[in-house]
Every structure is written in structure tokens, then in C-alpha cells.
Amino acid sequence: MAAPRVFPLSCAVQHYAWGKMGSRSEVAQLLASSDPGAAISEDKPYAELWMGSHPRGDAKILDDRISQKTLGQWIAENQDCLGSKVKDMFHGKLPFLFKVLSVETALSIQAHPNKELAEKLHLQAPQHYPDANHKPEMAVALTSFQGLCGFRPVEEILTFLTKVPEFQFLIGDKAATQLKQSMGGDSRSMASALQSCFSHLMKSEKKVVVEQLNLLVKRISQQVAAGNNMEDIYGELLLQLHQQYPGDIGCFAIYFLNLLTLKPGEAMFLEANVPHAYLKGDCVECMACSDNTVRAGLTPKFIDVPTLCEMLSYTPTKDRLFLPAQSQEDPYLYIYDPPVPDFTVMKMQVPGSVAEYKVLAVDSASILLVVQGRVTASTPTTQTPIPLQRGGVLFIGANERVSLKLAVPSDLLLFRACCLL
């Protein structure tokens, strides 16, 4: 009998400090629902669920007929399951890591290097940059999800320079004037002025940053206490971030970067060199397999200011929403296909009135997550159907045809990561 190429996975949970606590976390809820034996500790953060073969969280295979214990080991010995093009292009490895994130406190403001820079940084400082790969990523909201992404239009930044004197103080008159003067000019002089402003902020002395931040926090707190609305300068968010990361330079970054609130199903795509930070909420995330991160603030970790200021993309953009395309063949399928080869995310919303749903066969290994609903999965070759409920994760080898029978007549919400070359 041929070894199965479709099987359920038990996935690694990461308890980073920024995660939502206990059963308030979507990650914890998915875990508890898929594994009735899992005990959720209410005093522990459940930050990330890792669905993939990354060495720091390689998924375990839940199928006794398979001798390999983890997905990474299994793929190493069954490379054809990746799909012929994927196998060749990504040297026999799964090119993406699929995740669920539950964010309570802000993640650091960061950017990921492109391939060329990653190779250079990895050679120079492997302790900070552990591999030579790029790390584009996409987040699709599961609940209302707030994040910072990319530089705002220059006119918005100029407005904050006027309304927030503490911000203006750190950037300095010279850089602020240069930014104002770049308004009518070409995009290159605008990007250069923006870089100059951002670099001035990032290179400010810690003591001066703390002083100015304290002044701003005090001013906002007094205004809020007096019943005044400070939302024109994101008063509430600034107080929140300052509470989470007192004295941190990253608090001022909200005046440089677009603030997005994604509704469930909305997405943002973070290509190389785009500064971003996740602030609050739950999302599905997919990324290229890498751990390379250049940090800019809202973090106790190493901040590489010169590299960061040099590498960022200083092109201001207003709209950072990434829209999915509805599939031509399947009315329930939405495809988030970013401009990188490493991964594509699919969302399937199937009404409960559908008795059986056929998952699109693709020439790539893929990982399927059940967010809502209950199904049994089968393929033309499976002996026994695989039951999956909320939190269930299924590995699907390339070109496998999987059919899902709805166990109960309630709506299905599924996400899937694959590589469409």
C-alpha cells in the first residue's frame, strides 16, 4: 500500500510575551478545539501557531502509518510531494511557513531584507541574521486586526509635524523643512527627504527621546482627562504603546507609518524593505521561510539603526490593503496571490448547505487550516476519512484531490497556503 500523501498535523505553539493570554487567544482556541487533550493555561500567552516544517517548530504527523515523526523529515524523504517546479526552485524544501497570530501587545516595528541584502547581512552578522533568505509576508485578518504598514503620504506626516511639537523636535527643523520643500518635487527628492526625517528620529539620543515622549504622554493624558478628543494625533494608541514600551523610539513611528485596521478577510502584504508592525488582533500569516528581521522600535531586542535607515523603502503610499481575487472555477474560493513566488494564500468560505466541497488540486504541497466548521476529508486513495474540526490542520501533497464532507450543516471557513509557480 502506498504511503499516504494527505495527513493531519499537530502544530507547534509559540508562547511569545506579546501574545493574547489563555483562552482569549485565537491560537489557544484553535488548539483546544482541535486537541481535546490540550490544557490551556490562562496565565500563559498563546502568540503563534506554526504550520510547516521550520526547524524551530516542525509539525508532528498524526498518522501511525507514516514512519517519519515530523513534516520536515517526511518532506526530506518524499520530495515529489512538493510539486516538480516547487521542488526544483526551492531545493527540496517547503518554501513557506503558515501561521496563526494572536496579538495582545505590539510586535516590534521591523522590515525584512530582500534576498541580496539578506545574503550580505547573514555573512556579516550571522548572530543577528540567521539565514540568507528574504522574508516577504502576508497577514489576513481573522478578527479586527490593527497594524502599521509602509510610509504615509508626506502631507499627513507634515500635519503631524505641526500638531506634535515633540515629534518635530526630534526630527529637527532642517529635515522638516526639507520634507516640506520636497512636496512639489519628484518622487526621488521626496523619498530622500523622508529618509532624512526618519533617520533623524531613529538616531536621536535615548535621553532626548525619553524626555520628548514623556512631554507628549503628559500632554495627551491631561487633554484626555479634561475630556478632549486627541484622536487627530492618535492619542489613545500613543498612550497604549508607551505603556507597553515606555520611552521607546517606536512610539513616534505612528506618525510616519500608515495605521491600518483590517476587517476579517482583509489582508496586507509586506514586501521586502517595507516598515511594519502588528499592533493588535488575530490573523492568519504566511511568509517565506526565514527569520531575518531588521528592527526599528517597540522592542527590547537588538536594533540595527544604520542598516534599517539605509534599507527601507521610502515610497509613501496611502492604500496598503491587499485584495484577493475570486476564483473563476470555484465560487467559494478567494486567492491572495502576492508578487513573490514563495507562497499564495487561499480562503474558502463554504455555506453549510453544501454537502461536499472539493478542494482545488494544485501542483504544490499545501497546508489547510479549518477555522470554522466540521468536515471529514478523503482522497481517492485514503482508506479511512480524516475528521477535521475547528483548529484542524491537514497536509496535502502536490496534485492530491481532497474532498471535504460537511459533518454538520454549518458554514466552513478554511485557509490554505501553497506555492503557485
Image (cartoon, rainbow, N blue to C red):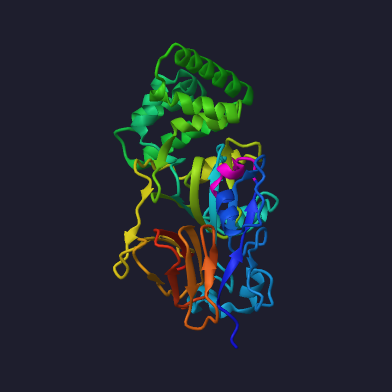
What range of the chain is rendered magenta? 16-26
Asked whether 56 falls inside the magenta stretch, the response is no
Q: Position of residue 170 (x, y in %)?
A: 52, 23
Asked whether 19 falls inside the magenta stretch, the response is yes
Q: Quadrant of the C terminus?
A: bottom left
Q: Is residue 323 above or below residue 235?
A: below
Q: Is residue 325 above or below residue 23?
A: below
Q: Is residue 312 left or right of residue 77?
A: left
As drawn, the residue found furthest toward the front would be 408
Residue plotted at (29% across, 68% down): 328
The answer to which quarter of the image holds residue 162 is top left
Q: Is residue 55 above or below residue 271?
A: below
The reply to whether residue 421 is in sight is no
In front of the other: 140 or 187: 140
In front of the other: 156 or 6: 6
Q: Quadrant of the N terminus?
A: bottom right
Residue plotted at (32% across, 60% down): 325
Q: Is residue 8 left or right of residue 355?
A: right
The reply to whether residue 164 is in sight is yes
Q: Position of residue 369 (x, y in %)?
A: 50, 61
In front of the other: 86 or 351: 351
Residue plotted at (46% across, 37% down): 195
The answer to which quarter of the image holds residue 403 is bottom left
Q: Is residue 365 above or below residue 38?
A: below
In front of the other: 329 or 113: 329
As drawn, the residue found furthest toward the bottom would be 1
Q: Is residue 409 left or right of residue 369?
A: left
Q: Position of residue 163 (x, y in %)?
A: 40, 20
